[in-house]
Structures are given as structure tokens and as C-alpha cells.
Amino acid sequence: MAQNTEKYNTNKRPTWCPGCGNFGIHMALKTALAELEIAPSETFIAFDIGCNGNGADTISTYGFKGLHGRAVALASGAKLANKKFTVIADQGDGACFHEGIDHLVNAIKSNYDITILIHNNENFALTTGQATVTTNQDKPMYGQPYGKPEKGFNINEFIMSLHPTFFAKGYSGDIKELKDLIKKGIKHHGCSVIEISQLCPSYNKEATPQWFNEHITKVSTLKDYSNKSYDKAMELSKKMTNDKIYTGVIYQQNNVESFYDNLKNRKNYKTELVDEVKEYNIKPLLKYFE
Ligand SMILES: Cc1ncc(C[n+]2csc(CCOP(=O)(O)OP(=O)(O)O)c2C)c(N)n1
């Protein structure tokens, strides 16, 4: 049944380019929240800096647009303060694998109960298309007209090497599949990482919708694949490149304690941290900076 996503809308018009994959990603996210019946007032989204982050204006939940690369850190803190909230970190491949890679590593290892959405358009788009780690080597990019000289690395293998409890891959052009993946990620107990191949008609022109359709295989069509097997997920991840993309839940491990479950000093607390914060008069402090 089609769900009402209007309650997640604002009256701001998106600034994304026509054909940008961020439209599909936001539609999938809003529909996932609507189908799970999670109210905007029970949701916190940490937005990053970048084209993806400009979506902060167009989705009506609690949110914070922080410094570049810090969406995961913000989301982790928000979840620890109030675990009744659904908490999402929304960021680009630049923020995730460059400025904020340490936060990704620690969120996965700590198994914070948050959902991390990685909008992977294979470049730093807001600053007009510089190379990121996911840009193909030798590809001419803004500021590098003779091609990107650096080697990249396989982000799928990297994520799997951190032993995530949930790792999925979606595509901005397949909103229905992406919506289902986001729902599964939100329902997962622990840190769910969803990497999304994102259309970028301005700075990754070659990867058109037709190109993606020819290069994506759904893991559900693979014989003998099990997303419960770490070895199979790692083997598949090692095969993945920008030209060989698999979508679906790549790996999921259930019944693993999250970071909060392991916090022994919080075991018998009925309140959330946010309930325990006292009000402080910060006027004297502000005066100090006058
Ligand atoms: C620490 C820091 N480094 C660099 C920048 C400049 N900057 C702003 S947006 C941006 C590109 C963001 O790329 P990405 O995170 O992949 O998101 P996209 O714009 O592609 O959605 C960069 C490099 C910044 N604001 N802060």
C-alpha cells in the first residue's frame, strides 16, 4: 500500500541538478520511514556537507547539518543520548571515505545502533567534481584534467573487513529496492551500512541509468549466495568494482549486542541520557567570549 510521505516534506525546493540520484534516495528514505510508521518527531538525521547534505532542507525530521565528514559522529552521539529515536547518518562518498573515514570505522566496530547511508556518486560533487577514492584511476576530473593519478581501494572489501553486522548496497534508480534495504537497515539491531550507487549526471556522466542497468546484479538472483555467510559476503565484495555492482543485503549478522547493550554502567537506567541533562545557565560563559 502506498504510504503518505508528505509529512516528511518541507516547503523548500531541492537545489540538486535534474536527474540527480539524491531525489531517488530521499524518496526511498521517506517511504521507508512512512512504511515503518516512524514519525518525523521520532527521527534524527545527521546530514553532512555536500550535495547530499543540501537535502537537509527538504526533509522534515529532527536533524543537524554538521561539519564535513562528521555525520556518523553526530548520529552516534544522538543515538547514545536517546536510543528511542531512529537515527540516520546521511553522507557522500567523499565525506565517508575521506574526511570521516575514522568515524565509519569506529561506528561499525562499536556497532552503534544507527543507519549509515552513503551516497556514492564517485566524486566530491558539491565542489564541482573532484576525484574521491571511488573515482576510477586515470579518469579526468576537475583539477585533474590528465586523470586521477592515485589508486583507489575497494570500499566493499574495506567495509567487510571491519566485520559489520549489516551491509547492503542499493541504487538511487531503484527506489523500491533501496526503500526495502533502508527499512531492513533501520530494523537491524546495530550499525547498518547502506552504500548507494548514485546517479550524478553532472560529474559522472558516463554512468547513465542505462549503464547502471547493465552493470548491476541483484544478489537475490545469485545461486548459492547467503548473506548470513561472512566468507561468501567477503568473496563477493572482493569481486566488486565500479563496473561490477551487486545490490541487496550483502551481509547481515543478527543477535549481536550493540554498543549500548554493552554499557554496563547504564544497565539499570530507565531514563535516556537526554532525560538526565540538567539545565545550565550559559550566559556567564557566553559573556567570556564577548
Ligand atoms: C573538512 C572539509 N574539507 C573539504 C571541504 C570542501 N567541501 C565541501 S562540499 C565537498 C564535496 C562533498 O563531497 P561528498 O561528501 O562526496 O558529497 P557530494 O557533494 O558528492 O554529495 C567538499 C570537498 C569542507 N567543507 N570541509
Image (spheres, helix red, strand yellow):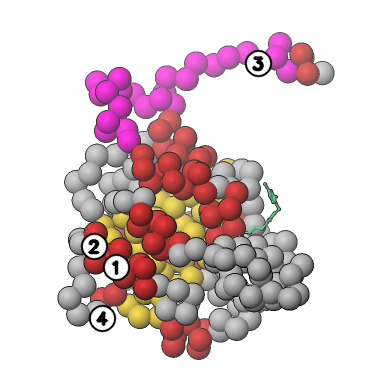
Name the amino acid, label 2: Asp
Image quarter for ligand 1 equals bottom right
Decide if residue 116 is on the left or right side of residue 221.
right
* Residue type at the position of mark 3: Ile
Quadrant of the rendered structure where residue 205 is? bottom right
Range of magenta residues: 259-286
Label 2 secondary element: helix
Say above or below: 142 vs 49.
below
Considering only vertical position in the picture, is 86 above or below 83? below
In this rendering, the label closer to the viewer, 1 or 4: 1
Residue that label 1 marks: 235
Comparing 59 with 87, the one in front is 87
User: Does the segment drawn in magenta span residue 279?
Assistant: yes
- The kind of secondary structure element at disc 4 is helix
Residue 187, horizontal then vertical, whole percent: 29, 52
Mark found first going from the N terminus, 3 or 4? 4
Tag 2 or tag 4, which sits nearer the N-term? 4
Asked whether disc 2 touches disc 1, contact meaning CB atoms under 8 Å apart, the reply is yes
> Counting other residues with Cα less than 10 Å from the Cα at mark 3, is it few (<14), some (14-19), or many (20 or more)?
few
Circle 3 is placed at which residue position?
Answer: 282
